[in-house]
Image (cartoon, rainbow, N blue to C red):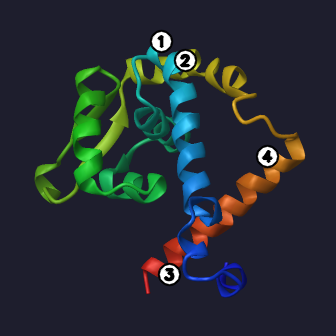
Amino acid sequence: MKKMLQTQTSEESLRLENQLCFPLYACAKEVVRQYRGPLEALNLTYTQYIVMMVLWEHGEMTEGELGKKVHLDSGTLAPLLKRLEKAGYINRVRPESNENKLFLSLTDEGENLKERALDIPPQMQGCIPLSEDDLILLRDLLNRALTCMSSNQRR
């Protein structure tokens, strides 16, 4: 990125076509839009779907642990978790022994939803029209960037 910026004039650096952040933003927004239809059948938003995937994979955890895995803060997670609880998919428990921690677990209905969610990945398989090799490369690059960005935030 520095090399790209070093060869650009200051005006060129403000062109949308020269931005890395814009295609990332636009692609993410488009992928989320494409998920909307299939997820409506599960009564989930994309962010709720991500939360449910983490709970299906890891089981009971605290809100803080979940937040780290999905890169969301408590202010964003709290209303989302309340909606999932109201839908009957999760339990939120704050034990008297440790009122600072909110424990999350799946209800039977939330566990059963996993079976219906198995249809989502095959439906979404072609939503990014790239070769399998390019998709793997893109995923790996984005994961590497996210890891680097996350570790830079902690410093």
Q: Residue at x 75, y 28 (%)?
A: 126
In this rendering, position of residue 101 left or right of residue 7: left
* Tag 4 near tag 1, CB within 8 Å: no
First along the sequence among labels 3 and 2: 2
The foreground one among 137 and 154 is 137
Q: Is residue 142 above or below residue 32?
A: below
In this rendering, position of residue 142 left or right of residue 32: right
The foreground one among 61 and 66 is 66
Looking at numbered disc 3 in the image, what kind of residue is underneath it? Asn
Mark 3 sits on what residue? 152
Mark 2 sits on what residue? 38
Q: How far apart, in angstroms, are the residues tagged by discs 4 and 3?
A: 26 Å
Q: Quadrant of residue 35 in the image?
A: top right
* Tag 2 near tag 1, CB within 8 Å: yes
Mark 4 sits on what residue? 135
Callout 2: helix, strand or loop? helix
